Structure formats: structure tokens, C-alpha cells
Image (cartoon, coloured by chain):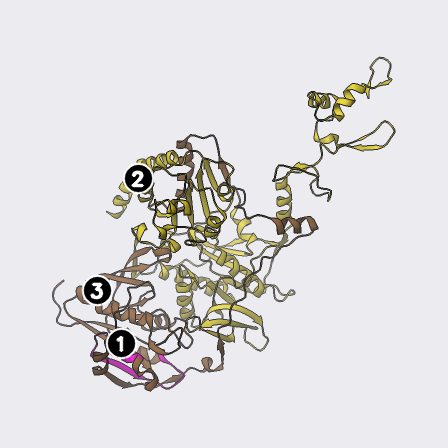
Chain colours: A yellow, B brown
Amino acid sequence: MTDDVMTGIARRDPRKEWIARNRLHPEHDRVLAELGKGSAAAIEWMGPHGVIRKNPHTAGFIGPSGLKRIDRSGLQQGGAPSVAVRARQESRRRIDIASPAFLVAVVPEMGGGRLSHHDRDLLGLARQLADADPDRPGAVLAVLFGGYKGEGEGEPKERALGEAGIDRLLHLTSDEYEGFAPEARLAALAAAERELAPRHWLLPDSPLGGADLGRRLAMRLEERPATGVWQLEADATCTLGWRCTARGAAGSLDIQRPLPRVALVLAECAEPVSDTLHAAEELTLNVELPANLTRIEDLGQVAVDPAAISLGEAEFILSAGNGVTDWEGFHHAAQCLGATEGASRVAVDNGFMPRDRQVGATGTWVTARVYVAVGISGAIQHLQGIQSCEKVVAINSDPGCDMIKRADLAVIGDANEVLAALVDLVESRRPQAKRGESRDAA
Amino acid sequence: MQPDSRPFEVAVLVSVGRHPLTGRARRADHDARGLELALGLGRHLDRLQVRAVHAGRHDSGNDTALRGYLGMGLAELTLVEQPDGADVIPALATVLTRSPPQLVVTGSRAECGEGSGLVPYALAERLGWPLVNGVVEVESIDNGVATLLQALPRGQRRRLAVRLPAILSVDGAAPAARQSAFGPAQRGELAPLQEAGVIDEAFAEWTFSPARRRPKRLKIIKATSARERFKAAAAKAEGGGGQVLSNVTSEQGAEAVYKLLEEEGVLR
């Protein structure tokens, strides 16, 4: 197949071709490279008789179980898997509502500075209200208080919020909204009501954010809100065109009533937005918000003994498994980090930790926001128990274990050493922070 | 604080609860916790006067429930008589403005009826008083300012200072109420107070049914090809591409973990 430069006659080296066909030959890779078939480009070529030849050995990819897979559906063609994911995101239908017929205002709770599942469900419900009439679509306005922590690296705020279904954004970042500041937040919402006059106000009925603020807002707007709403249906006989089903009497009654202007909505009330991308265009209020007199002063969070918090509702859990040998060090680390202690079943069975600290299907199902698994390989029962944790950190010496696959951040190394280094790090940086705090208080 | 001749007045709004299993009338759990909180203020104050107020109809069905509050150590309970289906907020607001206490304590939501938890908010808006929800403990009362502990989710607590008069609402995080004693409950007096009732018309138009079990959310798979459907069906749960640090020293690993913990704001 190599052309002779002098005569122009095609010359073939049968031995090299034979080596190229023989995958097990020690010189196979070198010969393939010589013949120009080593790269992914040489999957197909024209044979000497004008027939298209395919090399099945260069096609395909190594599957998750280590076996070679050839995908004949045409999707896999020369691409990294992330391309498909990216393409799906690009394929989100972009929707710009230039002149909305009305506004649906949503005040997400934004626990930890990002949209929670509850917020996403709420925005899905807001989209149902806004998009009910395709000829006269409304826009979803989100009022965010405090800083926003973007998701993913370098992802702009508009992108993440637009994917959640937000058309208009009112982002109020001021110190007066930090902590427990219902009076300042209420004043801002009342100003938004005066200026933008949304048709609906939707808030999550959750203890952290909406349950309190939403009831205050409703009373300020002189509306009677529906609380614990979990279902909506269109009904032309109602004032706003919707009828809702709400939980009443400590969750033992369903109340069917017309949807009022202010609704406090339970989690899983609607499906979150998944196939459209909205503009998340930023708005500003024209009126200057008055500096209001606050009668409630937030003196900050109180240090709570993490060991006294039940495992099921702890926010930050440091959990130990079979990889931990230095138990003194582990308890010290939990105390130093201010984490609630958890354990895998092995650690409990071996008598290192009490039974009530066991995490997993046979122990406690935890809901922690941050779960640090130290020396836990991740049995399926344990992984079930940490299903609802947001961030999982694994410190383990085995890079192939299931916990590493589940973790958002995994450190491969000796668990005891990493933990000791972490404690040193926290202790070395803590005094500075403490000094700063006392100065602020003074 | 100089000794004041007037006692510190606390009004506790109590309602008739409903046992979640038997459905029998009982003292409402949150309201009883509120009364417990109010009775516990005695350790901060020299002279404390706790007044329990119930607005609604009194009949044989809820007599035991209301006497349950008296059994916690009260001599009398103010009974603001209201017809069936009345909105109790105007009546309560009138009673509270006529003899304003320094502190009003309520439960966070009722156990029967609408149970929307709006009573403290409506009263706060009408009276123009500040409102703090989810109070667990009153730490001190000094010069017209109360220092409180508020319950946050996940067992956390927040300290707040609120100017009196104020309304506090109490939920299940507050300390459990003491047992109700039978003798004092029978000896205690229900002092009736006539108030004009305002019938709640919107409430009468709603339809009520026993709570239906909410449908379980299904996992919706949006697949365009058979291959994607198969992949979704056979997929193992994964964290979605976490970062794996291998071949690092323990210091570098600890640094990465520290960074994540700091970003999440769990280090205090």
C-alpha cells in the first residue's frame, strides 16, 4: 500500500499487513502507526479492490466494566461523552418573554445561597401559572435576597437561574437582608409589589424562608394566603382562574379553595423546569427603599453542641468506617470541626461507636448538607442512608470503592493522616477568625 | 432594672387541639408549649402574670381540652365567646388592645380548622407589634427588650433581641409542656367574655376532605433513542462526576476538604 517514490507503483508489505491484522503481535502498535491506522481516523478505508474496509478494533470505547463496546446507533461517533451532555443542555429551548402580560413573583428560600429542590419545584409551578395561556404568556419574577453562590465552575448566574425557569430577576444584596431580617425583607417585597404589581406571589412553605416571610407579606398586602398548597388546577370560575388544594388542620385535611394572590407552597408541588432556558434578565427597583426601623435585632447563631443534635437532622456529619484506626483523633476532629459524629455499620459492630450513631438503611437516614465519610468504602445500605445528602466528601485509601463514585470530592490517602492534617489546618486558621469575630462584637 | 409595681403581663392564646390518632379534642401541643414557655418566665421576673385566652365556642366536647390548660397551674382562663364559624382575629385583637399585655405567646398553627398559622401574623399586623416565630427560649427580659432563642432547622439556634410589646410564636422545637393535673383543672375557672363575632364567609365556601396521600413523584426519563432509555434504566446512582484527588499528600487533601467545608459554610 505504500507508494514507491521512484516508480509510482503501489508496493505492499505483506508482513507488515499481517502484523497490522494481528492485534496480539508485539510490534502491532508500531506497525499500525507506520501504516497510518493508529489514530481514530483510520476506522474506515478503501481496500485494494475498492471495497470499504472497517477496523472494528479501533472503533468503540471502553465501557464501565472494562470491556470494549461498539455503539452502532451513531451517537458515539468520535466524541467524548461530555459532548452529548453539553449538546442536551444546548438543546434547551431558549425562551425570551419581551413584554409579559403579567408577572408571577417567586421568593425562593435560597438555603446556602443556591436554589434548593423546593425552590425548583416552586419555579416549575410558577411556570405553569405563567405559561397557561400561550397567546399571553406571563413572566416569572424571582426576588432573591443575599448573595448567590453559582453552581458549577464559571457558570454565570443568569444561566443557572434561567435553567430553573426565571425570566426576570430582582436581586437584592444588602447587609440589612442578612440573617433574620423579616422587616427589611418585607419592606423590599412591599416595594416590589407597588412597582411591579405581580398577579401571583408564590413562596415555599418551608421553615427557613417562606413560611414566615410569606405570611407576613400576605398580611401586609391584606390578602388571605393559601398555606400548604400542593396541587393546582385551572378553574375559570375562580377570580384568578385557578383552584388549589391545600393541607389544613396539621396536615389532616385537604382544603379545596380558589387560589388567592399569595400562596405558600409545599415541596414537590410541580415538576421543575427541565427543557427550556429563560432569560433571567435583571431588574432594579426605581424607588429608594426606606431605611426602616428594626425592632428585631439578630444577635447571630448560637453554638449548639453538635453531639446533642440528632443524627437525622444534623447539617454536617463526620462519619467513620473501617478505615479509621485512630479513634481519639477522630473524636477530636469531630469536635474541632463542629461536626456531628456518624459511623458505618462496621465501626458500630466492632464497638467503636454507639448504635445510635449508625448511618445507613439499618441505622439512620441522614439529611446532612455536608457528609464527610472517613474510611468508609460505601456499602449499598450505607449509600442508601446518605441519599439525600447534598455534598459528600470521601477520604479513603481505595480509589475503586463505591463511596468515591458517589462523592463530590474524594481524597485518596490514609484516612487518619488526612484527618489529622485537616484538624491542624482548622486549628491553625481558627484563631484568626475568632479574633475577627470578637472585634466585630466590640 | 428597678422593681416595677405593675406585674409583667403575658397573654397566651390557646386553642382546642385534636389528637392525631384518635381525633379526640385535647390541649393543642404547640399552645401548651407556649403556655409552658410563659410560665417559665417567672425565673427572670419578680412579678409575672400569665393570662390564657381562648376564643371560640365552649361546649361539653372541648371542656376537657380547655381545662387541660388550667391543669398546668392557672387559676382561670379567659374565654372569648364566639359563634361557630367565626373569624377569631377581630375579637382577639379587641381583647388584646383593651388590656394590652407586654408579651403575647401563641402556638405556630392550630390542629383543626384551617390551621394556616396566620393568627400571630394577623394580630401582629393589626396591633403593629413585632413578631418572632419559632421561639424556643426566652433568655432574659430587660428594659423592655427580650432576648430570645429561635429554632432553625437542623437543631440550630439563633439569638434575637426584640423590643416589647411583641408576639412570640412557638412550635414543636420548644420544650415540652408539663403534665396537666386533674384537680387544679377541675377547680380552675373558665371566665367568659362576650365579644361580637364576625362570621368567616370565605371559609364557609371551601370544601374540606380528609387529607389524601400525596402522589409519589415519578422519575421522568426524557430519552430520544432506545439507547438512552436503556442507559437510564440500567444506570447506577452516581454523584455526577465528583472530583477525585489521588497521589496527593495528606496536607493537600486536607486543604481541598477544608476549602469545600468553608465554601459550604459549615465550619464555625
- Nearer to the camera, B212 or A163: B212
The N terminus of chain A, quarter of image: top right
Of tags 3 and 2, the one toward the viewer is: 2
Helix, strand or loop at disc 1? Answer: helix
Question: In percent of the image, x 33 and y 69: which residue is there?
Answer: B30
* Image position of A190 (left or right of A133): left
Q: How far from the left and from the top, in percent, is residue A257?
A: 51, 76
Name the amino acid type tagged 1. Tyr
Q: How many marks?
A: 3
Q: Which residue is mark 3?
A: B144
Report whether mark 2 lies on the same chain as mark 1.
no
Residue A211 position by quadrant: bottom left
Q: Write the start and end of the magenta stretch as one range.
A: B65-89
Name the amino acid type tagged 3. Gly
Cα distance, mark 1 to mark 3? 28 Å
Cα distance, mark 3 to mark 2? 48 Å
Q: Which residue is mark 2?
A: A328
Q: Is residue B85 magenta?
A: yes
Letter of the chain that mark 1 sits on in the rendering: B
Residue A137 position by quadrant: bottom right
Q: Which residue is mark 1?
A: B69
Q: Is residue A19 above or below residue A314?
A: above
* Image position of A82 (left or right of B33): right
Question: In percent of the image, x 47 and y 30: which residue is there?
Answer: B247
Cα distance, mark 2 to mark 1? 49 Å
Name the amino acid type tagged 2. Glu
